[in-house]
Amino acid sequence: MLFKKLSDLDVAGKRVFIRADLNVPLDDVGTISDDTRIRASLGCIRMALDKGAAVMVTSHLGRPIEGEPKPEDSLAPIAARLAELLNKPVRLIHDWTAGLFRIQPGEVVLLENCRLNRGEKANDGELAVRIATLCDVYVNDAFATAHRAETTTHALALTAQLACAGPLMAAELEALGKALEAPAKPLIAIVGGSKVSTKLTILDNLADKVDQLIVGGGIANTFLLAAGYKVGKSLVEADLVPEARRIMAKMAARGASVPLPTDVVVAREFSASAEAITKPATEVADDEMILDIGPDSSAALIGLIAGANTIVWNGPLGVFEFDAFAHGTASMARAIAESPALSLAGGGDTIAAIGKFGVADRISYISTAGGAFLEFLEGRTLPAVDALCQRVHH
């Protein structure tokens, strides 16, 4: 993937338009409950300021109705928080597409919720032309929205005089590219979670690339069933057994494999206080459900991770929220943390597990972009990324 980067451009005295991801959670009274995304966007804003640019920032917030502003859709609390973090005033500009505001180099303004503009969701070309007149340089630093073709993520990137990636976007694309486009082998992917149906395209795409495809959670149950094991009353998608068999056959045909658990931890009820019983994967009773992998499977998995040079991780191996069934995910998380391999992790449950087991600082790259990260793993073209790549020579 080739794209221009803000870090390489001279933007002194120029008007820089940054599409950031400031879509933070707000409580009932409109107070920000987690400002992680705002903090993450500071690097790009400061970079543009340090280079002497006049900086405009916009983002979506929630799902407002276009053309119908309501107080709860406003970026006002975000403007206030940005001003505190940057230690300088941040004006909030309403109705900004008319271009009736002025901005000087060294100044930052926040442009009201871009999803309030009519045509934003429809990726409207005329809206993009209007916005393009406001800036000299367009910067996309919102990887989390890269899978959506909207005016400020796609049409504007194709219309602006100059389009580039901000530092967050660039770091994410470089990490993903290293892990999947030109990985150091062996490449191992760990795909966990409750359902094969939600991860089928990911499993299918990775099955063409990886040396080992490790499945966990409810997904592993469907693969165990496909391999002829009894899974009792475990969460399973029996209708996807043919798909699981096809993926295992595809891996086997190119000398790769889907290593299945040899032992499992089962319980008779789904609760934190349920009795956890470890047994061979061949002996699951009809009234039992598989809630984690057993110690032998864990040891085998740790061995595979130790031999890998690239690791992609999306999803837990068991019900890690219950301590009795967290051992598989915990030991895997620690093995990935201890490995010198390039490790790339993402997805909501994965981030929760990384937090619970305290390994965040030892994973090479953690993607906080749910949908865009998953679509990249599925092998799809992300519209916002495609637009930046098209603009390399302009």
Image (tube, rainbow, N blue to C red):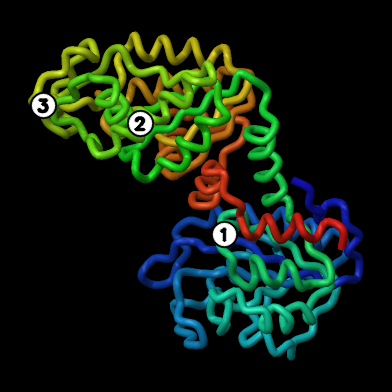
Mark yes or no: residue 111 visible.
Answer: yes
Q: In this view, does 89 lie to the left or right of 232?
A: right
Q: In this view, does 311 lie above or below 133?
A: above
Count neighbours of disc 1 (C-alpha within 10 A) and say few if under 14, some if 14 to 19, many if 20 or more.
many
> In the displayed structure, would residue 134 be above or below residue 364?
below
- SS at mark 1? helix
- Mark 3 or mark 2: which is in front? 2
Instruction: Tell me: 281 left or right of 21.
Output: left
Residue 81 is drawn in which quadrant?
bottom right
Report if the CB atoms under discs 2 and 1 are less than 8 Å apart: no
Spatial separation of the CA atoms under disc 3 and disc 2: 26 Å
**Amino acid type indicated by mark 3:** Arg
Q: Quadrant of residue 175?
A: top right
Residue 353, percent from left and from top: 41, 34
Q: Residue 349 carries which label?
A: none
Along the polypeptide, which appears first: circle 2 or circle 1? 1
Residues packed near mark 2 inside 10 Å, few (<14), some (14 to 19) or many (20 plus): many
Residue placed under numbered mark 1 in the picture: 145
Which element type, helix, strand or loop, lies under badge 2? helix
Q: Mark 2 points at which residue?
A: 244
Nearest the camera: 14 or 280? 280
Describe residue 225's horizontal placement relative to residue 90 as left or right.
Answer: left
Disc 1 residue type (three-letter): Thr
The CA distance from mark 3 to mark 1 is 41 Å
What is the distance, in whole Å, between disc 2 and disc 1 at their CAs?
30 Å
The image's mark for residue 268 is 3
Q: Which residue is drawn at 61% across and 36% down?
A: 365
